[in-house]
Amino acid sequence: MCRKHLTLPVTLLLALVIAVPAMGEFDNPKAKAPPRGNPSRVSAAESLPPLPLPATPLRRSEKKRQPAPPALIGMVNFSQTRATLVNGQRQVVSAFPTTQIDIERLIRVANRRLNVQYRFMRVTLEKFSWDPQELPVLYLTGWTEMPELSDAILDRLRRYLYDGGTLVVHAQCGRDEFVSSAKHQIKRLFPKRRLAPLDTDSPLFNAYVPIKEMRFRRDDKPFETAPPYLEAVYLGCRPAVIFSSIDLNCGWDVVNNPIMGGILYHQDDALQLGMNIITATLANFQYARAWGVQKVYHEGSAKSRDELVIAQIAHDGDWDPTPHALPNLMKHIQANTTLNVQFKREVVNLGEVDVFKYPVLYMTGLRDFKFGQADADRLRKYLSSGGVLVADAGAGFTAFDKAFRREIKKVLGKDLKSLPLDSQVYRTPYKLQTVDYSSLVKATQAVNTPSLEGITIDGQLGVIYSRFGMAAGWEQLGFAYNRGYADADALRLGVNVFAHALMH
């Protein structure tokens, strides 16, 4: 087998591999593979009641229904049909053909390797219960244009995802007809959220097997390799919609049976990626359920204290993965400090910031982002006028960390510098010389001291930044893949950071 290592950027690679021309009706050989039969159990030694003599008692083997394991994945089937000509005869076929060969084998292999016992089942969106506790994952795959979803179905699907469900969308053979139509439906589902590539440090590429590169094959050409590629829409810190524009080929021997007009991952690599998706989805489920419950802290209608507004910056890098974080931290500050204020969170664009109205800005995120020139100029003016910016990488995501360092240097012309352990930030109101980190951090690093960075402007800290996630700890929702501080110390550190920002 010939393998060629690609050095092209992933986005350019994707543009190359999904450019499959639609030439007439695509014949997908995977659709012709028969599904496996349901498992059955046969007991060969059970007697019938005795018959009257002189007949001889009979014994028979009797099929028994195998107890069904819990359903993990619902494979979406559409009920629409269309008429077509087959060998000159009119036949009614599915308007959206699909195949279960990949999910069938993935579940079978995952049950064995992960030592779990799950099954998939077929569902229709018209009759689906929309309860993630009954069916945590919806799986949609095809190679033709995806049907247009009604507004009512989109509303139910959106609610299902906010309630903790996950949608996995998979382009059979990488067909562009499906890719384009599926992206259109996802855009309708979440018009204000980005479907964008995942970074290589995503749990979907590391949860069970670390995956650095994957083999794929176009037509019958030699195999090529590239970093793993998935796109996702985030709800909170988890990918709630997972989209693959390359065939996640778990059930087809593409080595010996290439599919002309198709682009498929090597079966072994696709199985590893599939098990990562299952592992991460299961690990995220309780977090997803908790995140979907909106927490609102109501202040009394009559203000007994001054009101302090903390503004959170909206940007283009999934700016609000932890919407419960600031309200929960504010409640903790009110209960544990002498700051006699009522806190309020507002969401702002940088063009709206006013140092007199917003003495402290906060920002976080998951992905790469960029400040426009006008936004960078406005932030520079805000910080030079005495405002303070507090920021952290959402759940410790590397993409945001890299972007923040780049963008804040563009704003101030300075690099972030580590705060020494004798910094006042670590001393008031809590003395924080040692802190606890999340399990994911401790599994890879030997660290037990706080790790904040900052930029000084006119002798005062104008920027306070944490590459380790603080806000995921403020939310206290138990995100399994948080690369940050443990919840209790995240709250204490957050209190110190905002107390310092407000009092200095």
Image (cartoon, grey):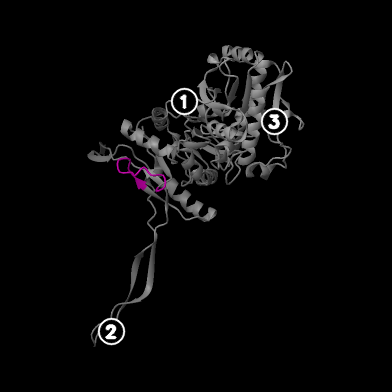
Query: Which three-letter amino acid code belongs to the residue tagged 2?
Result: Thr
Q: Residue furthest bottom?
A: 54
Question: Does residue 141 show up magenta in the picture?
Answer: no
Mark 2 Cα-neighbour bin, 10 Å: few <14, some 14–19, many ≥20: few
Query: Which three-letter amino acid code belongs to the residue tagged 3?
Result: Leu
Closer to us: 309 or 255:
309
Q: Return the mark for residue 56.
A: 2
Residue 39 image point, x, y percent:
39, 59
Mark 3 Cα-neighbour bin, 10 Å: few <14, some 14–19, many ≥20: many
Locate residue 227 relative to residue 178 in the image: left or right. right
Locate residue 206 relative to residue 30 in the image: left or right. right
Distance from label 1 to label 3 (Cα)?
37 Å
Residue 226 image point, x, y percent:
58, 34
- Secondary structure of the residue carrying tag 3 is strand
Distance from label 2 to label 1 (Cα)?
91 Å
Residue 396, placed above or below residue 356: below
Query: Which residues fall within the magenta stretch?
Result: 122-134
Distance from label 3 to label 2 (Cα)?
86 Å
Q: For mark 1, what is the residue?
A: 302
Q: For mark 3, what is the residue?
A: 452
Residue 105, placed above or below residue 169: below
